[in-house]
Image: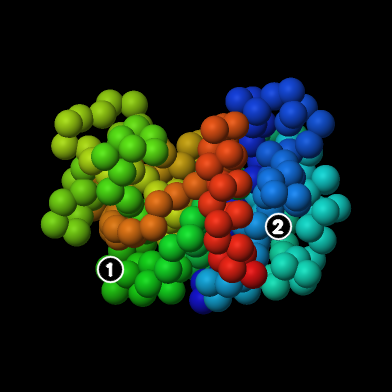
Amino acid sequence: MLPVAILAGGLATRLRPVTEKIPKSLMEINGEPFLAHQLRLLASRGIRRVTLCVGYLGELVEAYAGDGSRFGVALTYSADGPQLRGTAGATAQALPILGESFFLLYGDSYLPCDYAAVERAFVESGQPALMTVYHNRDQWDASNVHFEGGRILTYNKKRRTPEMRHIDYGLGVFHSTALGGVPDHGAYDLADLYQGLLTKGELAGYEVSQRFYETGSFAGIQELSRYLAENKAATK
């Protein structure tokens, strides 16, 4: 299985004051930090190598998770440094660790999908990048993808249209060449990278059937807490 990069360097302003002293990934859910649940889920899906792209309070994340062995994965770390790089910038900075191809997900995402199937779809597409999408219909968040006939026709988080019934699921797969246009300095957003790749015809799409969970809001945390309580086997 491909390695995974987790974008865990955000400031998590929506969760303040809780995140003024701890990073979002260490917020306690059902008795332990979210990161523990996330890493065990990845291990249960066959993932063995994970790189955490850290920034804000990243030293606390490393102190807690260590080498990842107790969660069933080998953990490495890539730090933003003094200048925030944004989601795409942080990913590009981690390329020397990640290698040629890798999964990418957000530090507040719990995604109980079939990672092996996503990897196969990426390889079969022949494209340098793949976005997973979910038939959301504005149910869990605002839909931002027009996906039809197995293809992403439009993706835009700011200008939504009635045809957008899917949402960016939060799991991408990239070849390192897909990040060739990311600037060496300053912040660059993953959404802009996706849009650029789509414009060039270099973004494949794959629809997953399992809904996503997120810890970017207190409501999302409550939903995930309920899910974990009802599906304890999913995190073991």
Q: Nearer the viewer, mark 2 or mark 1?
A: 2
- Say which of 59 and 222 sits in front: 222
Q: Position of residue 127 (x, y in %)?
A: 31, 63
Residue 49 image point, x, y percent: 63, 70
Element class at badge 2: helix
As drawn, is 6 to the left or to the right of 104? right
Q: Which residue is located at x 75 percent, y 50 percent?
A: 31
Sort mark 2 into few (<14), some (14-19) or many (20+) by Cα contacts within 10 Å.
Answer: some
Residue lying at 33% horizontally and 37% vertically, measured from the top left = 139
- Quarter holding the C terminus is bottom right
Residue 189 visible in the displayed image: yes
Q: Who is closer to the viewer here, 154 or 29?
A: 29
Q: Residue 36: which numbered mark, if any?
A: 2
Question: Decide: marks 2, 1 in contact (CB < 8 A)?
Answer: no
Which residue is outermost to the left? 149
* Image position of 189 with respect to 112: above or below: above
The tag on residue 125 is: 1
Please identify the residue farthest to the front as the structure is shown: 230
Coloring scheme used? rainbow
Residue type for callout 1: Ser
In terms of sequence position, does the residue under pointer 2 or pointer 1 come before the other?
Answer: 2
Cα separation between marks 2 and 1: 32 Å
Q: Is residue 137 above or below residue 3?
A: above
Q: Nearer the viewer, residue 184 or 31?
A: 31
Res. 98 visible in picture: no
Horizontal side of 36 relative to 191 (left or right) equals right
Residue at 43%, 56% (x, y): give it.
172
In the picture, residue 193 is in which quadrant? top left
What residue is drawn where x is 77% and y is 71%?
Answer: 69
Tell me where residue 57 appears, x and y as whole percent: 78, 38
Q: Position of residue 83 (x, y in %)?
A: 69, 33
What amino acid does circle 2 point to?
Ala
